[in-house]
Image: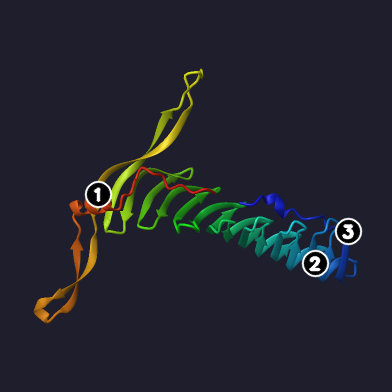
Amino acid sequence: MSDAGSEEFEDEQGSLGEYEGDRNEAGERHGQGKAVLPKGDTYQGAYESGKRCGQGTYKFKNGARYTGEWYMNLKHGQGTFYYPDGSRYEGSWVDDQRQGHGVYTYPSGDTYDGEWLHHQRHGQGTYTHHNTGSQYMGTWIMGKMESAGELIHQNHRYQGNFVNNNPSGPGKYVFDVGCEQHGEYLQIDQDKGDAEDDEPFITTILKWRPKAVTGLSVWTNEKDSSTSGTTISSFKYQTTVDCLYTVALQCVSLNSIYSFTF
């Protein structure tokens, strides 16, 4: 995510820079106007008593741009910020920070659509990977996947609890073939110590411990020979044996971790 420092504005107090536009009786910038600031940034839009207030566009010398609502020289309300690295945020702002609902598009094409607080993903939201289409849908706390959530992949999904961006504790995999595998994610400490080191290096990995595979009821369409080939819909229950076989055919390694890079 782009550095918030790329959003720092030039001081526009008093008569700094060049200005063309409306003024009030006190000589302050008031109404519609355009300003060229000393370091090369520009602003065109509404002013109120010398401050950016209302709709306007601020262009940075580094190529960044904000178009949207302002209040007292701060981004406040609905607006879109285009960052120098090609990323973009479109949504709600409060006191110069991403806050409320918004959509952030990353340089890679990945997107986050959801709630924000103090520039961080916070609340309910969906992160989508552009290359694979994989998604995380669920709860975020200060930029990280936390609490209840769901990882969605091409032919299966994982539902469970998350801690510090990783699945943790009880959960289940749901496969498109009509099966569920219940289990839990465990944190396993591994000793990576070197014989020459005085202290071993401990790293933590995640391991999926399966507990049960169950079948799901699925709709099937069948021909009824007694009614001249009429198609009827019915439930077909896929057995545990069927599920184990179909899951194995997918060659899914449940001990591999589907992690996101933010």
Task: Name the foreground residue: 77 vs 156.
Answer: 156
Residue at left 33%, top 49%? 252
In the drawing, does residue 40 fall left or right of residue 116?
right
Residue drawn at (20%, 66%) of the image: 235
Q: Earlier in the sequence, mark 2 or mark 3?
A: 3
Report whether 122 appears left or right of 192.
Answer: right
Compared with 55, 117 (above or below) is above
Report crowding for label 1: few under 14, some 14 to 19, many 20 or more residues within 10 A (C-alpha): many
Q: Which residue is mark 3?
A: 16
Residue for badge 2? 48
Q: Position of residue 251 (x, y in %)?
A: 31, 50
The three-letter amino acid code for the residue at tag 1 is: Val
Disc 3 and disc 1: Cα gap in Å?
A: 70 Å
Please provide percent x and percent y for residue 206. 40, 39
Tell me, yes or no, whether the two marked residues, 2 and 1, touch with CB atoms within 8 Å: no
> Dot 1 corresponds to which residue?
213
Q: Is residue 161 left or right of residue 235?
A: right
Residue at image coords 34%, 46% = 253
Against 14, is 248 above or below? above
